[in-house]
Image (cartoon, helix red, strand yellow):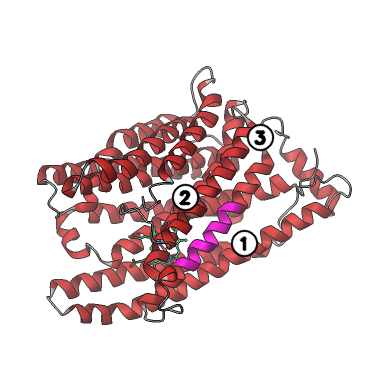
Amino acid sequence: MNSASETSALESDFPRHEALVEERLVFWYFCAALTFMVVSMLAGILMGLQLIRHNPLPHLEILSPGRWRMVHTNAIAYGFLANAFLGIMHWVIPRLTLRPVLSRPLSYFIFAAWQFVVLATAVGILLGQAQGVEWGETPVWIDPLALLGLLLVAINFGAPILRVKGPLYVTLWYYLAALVWTFLTYAMGNVVPEYFVCGSSAGAVGGLFIHDLVGLFVTPLGWGMMYYFVPILLKRPMWSHGMSLVGFWGLAFFYPLQGIHHFLYTPIPMFLQYGAVLSTIALELVVVTVIINFVGTLYGTGGAVLRNLPLRYFYTGILFYFITCLQCALQTTLTFQALIHFTDWVVGHAHMVMFGVFSMWQLGVMTYLVPRILKTEWYNQDWCEWHYWASTAGLAVMAGDLILGGLFQGWSWAAMQPWESSIRVSIPFWSVRMVAGLVMFAAQLLFVLNLYLTWRKSRQLVPGTESSSGFVAA
Ligand code: HEM
């Protein structure tokens, strides 16, 4: 296909929504997200090397692996996942509500402010200013700015959603709730343990915070996105709208009750620990309804997953989601916790959720949207396939390796062996993690290169019509 017909084919397939969607900003968010992902992965590699006793940067406090570990997790959560979600919401919300966001200048301001907050957090952590709250390490002076940013995000996206007359599609339920929950969760986790409570009470709030960050920020934005893109790509509605709502309300009701399941066997009162275990079991049932709904939607068109790359990303993520939920069912029992607590089982689980599920979904959406935003096919389609396979294989090996390694660590501790022997047992697993991590990292670099060359190609497509940003003019 030549360039001109390629452009017009894409444009006729996808009617223009320029009046509603600020496509350039969606693309900028994707670029920012991928930049932070590369930084985060470099930090993960540094920490991983330290664990196999090959720290390439010893004796430098500012580059110490403990600090880079926090940069790794913060940059992935707030730099990669959040940036990608914000970009995708800029695409989805105006289309579903048929209204633009409240203010485009505000959108650009939020974009700049968000990058400042994430960057300042990384620098603050490296300078030793981290706050002593897991996932809330953002230095205290940045917290008010981050909260203000979240409030502006809620206002900017909330306005078009609240103006919708009539029933809301399930994606908008998830989005609206996430806008409110994320603000409240961030405020709770970063402010309450710092200024108001201490000891095991602070532990309970910290547990709720880390859990709600996944459950009330990442999960609703992730599932909301899937409820939008899966039916579009499959060209059929969700199998059951009623079940979609069961999933939403089940999440809203049960998720906030579970935070303490991260701190089983701690001095937090046992009735709270049992309560968290029970509500986790209840949520498992809710999660099954969501997965059944997505599998039901695919029923009869399973081949599409093999042919269509973004769909493959989505359903691979759903498969990993199913596996992580199975793990949760084990992890939430006190018997199993006794074995895996503090082991690499948890780190394997965390990578499977964050990369195997949510990042896979976002990478699938990027693979789908970039050609639509730049109005040209990917520079190299094969590289997109390589990106998928290397990411999936790398993650599967990393997660499987850490989960298995965690069991060996747990057995070593349960057998009362000396600490050093559990380290000896772990080294081969940590070495395999490095290999898998490098494969995942190489895959993301290939994706970034492909994105850059696609952007360059889009500038050359129709001479004289591209805007200064490289986007083909309408
Ligand atoms: C180059 C690839 C990667 C490598 C080498 C790597 C390595 C690491 C290491 C060494 C840790 C610390 C483990 C510990 O303290 O024992 C860690 C933690 C973590 N990483 Fe990665 N990582 C990589 C990619 C990613 C990606 C892409 C994500 C998410 C999308 C991610 C999410 C996390 C999370 C959530 C934790 C915290 C786990 C916990 O505290 O339980 N990592 N990673």
Q: Which residue is mark 1?
A: 447
Q: Is residue 165 left or right of residue 69?
A: right
Earlier-in-chain disc, 2 versus 1: 2
The answer to whether one can see residue 156 in this image is yes
Residue closer to the observer: 400 or 97: 97
**Distance of label 2 from label 1 (alpha carbons):** 20 Å
The residue closer to the viewer here, 437 or 189, is 189
- What is the C-alpha distance between the residues marked 2 and 3? 23 Å
Q: Amino acid at mark 1?
A: Phe
Residue 39: in magenta span:
yes
Q: Within 10 Å of the Cα at label 1, are there few (<14), some (14-19), or many (20+) other Cα atoms?
A: many
- The span shown in magenta is 32-43
Is residue 85 rendered magenta in the image? no
In front of the other: label 2 or label 1? 2
Residue 144 drawn at (x, y percent): 42, 40
Q: Residue 37: percent from the left, percent from the top?
A: 52, 59
Q: Which residue is mark 3?
A: 21
The quarter of the rendered structure image containing the C terminus is top right
- In the rendered image, residue 158, in percent from the top left (x then y), is placed at 50, 28
Ligand 1 shows up in the quarter that is: bottom left
Choose between 109 and 51: the one closer to the eye: 109
The answer to which of marks 3 and 1 sits earlier in the sequence is: 3
Instruction: Identify residue type, mark 2.
Output: Tyr
Report which residue position mark 2 lands on.
78
- Mark 2 within 8 Å of ligand 1, using the beta carbon: no
Q: CA distance from mark 3 to mark 1?
A: 24 Å
Compared to 121, does 403 lie above or below?
below
